Image: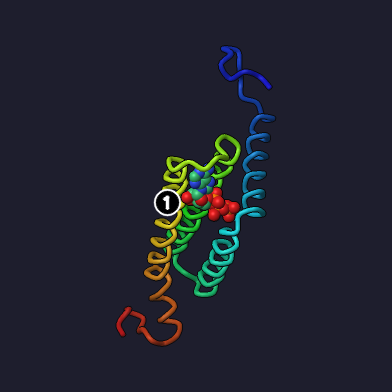
Amino acid sequence: MSDPLDPNHRVTGVQWRNKFGYAFAGIRDSFLTQASFWVHLPAAVVVIALAAFLQLESWRWAVLILCIAIVIAAELFNTAMEQVVVVLHPVRDPRIARALDAAAASVLVVAVASVAVGLIVLGPPLLEWLGVLGNDGDL
Ligand SMILES: Nc1ncnc2c1ncn2[C@@H]1O[C@H](COP(=O)(O)OP(=O)(O)OP(=O)(O)O)[C@@H](O)[C@H]1O
């Protein structure tokens, strides 16, 4: 592997392939080892299926995709923290607990906010399809 600090260092196609390879390995490993993904993933599939079924406008798609991505990214960061702690500091320490709890809290915050955003974005078209709302959004 070439040294990025070397002035003659140049980015190559192989390096880009490796970067994607590492990233996909991280996604695959996290999905296979973290129980939380088995909640986030089905939830994301349901939201995407509902969005496709309701033929949502593109801005609603954009908001939903962003929410899903932020939750998954937060979970991946949380997983990274946990894995680093397991290796670097397996002994329990209240300061580590505080850091891991904060990382877990970040996932909770974006997950709760995403549920709220999902209800706001998906709710009206869903209620409209169910016949509860008129086309103009009135009850
Ligand atoms: N080395 C440690 N020192 C102190 N507290 C820890 C340590 N490791 C874990 N903890 C505590 O345990 C909590 C859960 O951490 P853990 O890494 O087990 O996450 P988890 O999501 O419950 O586990 P998993 O990812 O295996 O499902 C942390 O939020 C923290 O309070």
Which image quadrant is residue 31 in?
Answer: bottom right
Nearest to the observer: residue 34 or residue 9: 34
Nearest to the observer: residue 17 or residue 43: 43
* Residue 92: percent from left, percent from top: 52, 43
Position of the N terminus by quadrant = top right
Q: Disc 1 marks which amino acid?
A: Ser
Q: Name, please, the residue furthest toward the left.
A: 138
Which image quadrant is residue 12 in?
Answer: top right
- Give the number of marks: 1
Number of other residues with Cα within 10 Å of mark 1, as a class: few under 14, some 14 to 19, many 20 or more: some
* Residue 108: percent from left, percent from top: 43, 57
> To which residue does mark 1 refer?
106
Nearest to the observer: residue 110 or residue 44: 110
Which image quadrant is residue 131 in?
Answer: bottom left
Residue at image coords 44%, 60%: 111
* Residue 43: percent from left, percent from top: 54, 66
Say whether residue 75 is visible: no
Is disc 1 placed on a helix, strand or loop? helix
Residue at image coords 60%, 54%: 34
Above-or-below relation of 68 to 83:
below
Above-or-below relation of 81 to 125:
above
Residue at image coords 45%, 82%: 129
Render colour scheme? rainbow
Left or right of 121, for residue 16: right
Nearest to the observer: residue 55 or residue 35: 35
Residue at image coords 55%, 45%: 82
Position of the C terminus by quadrant = bottom left
Above-or-below relation of 104 to 88:
below
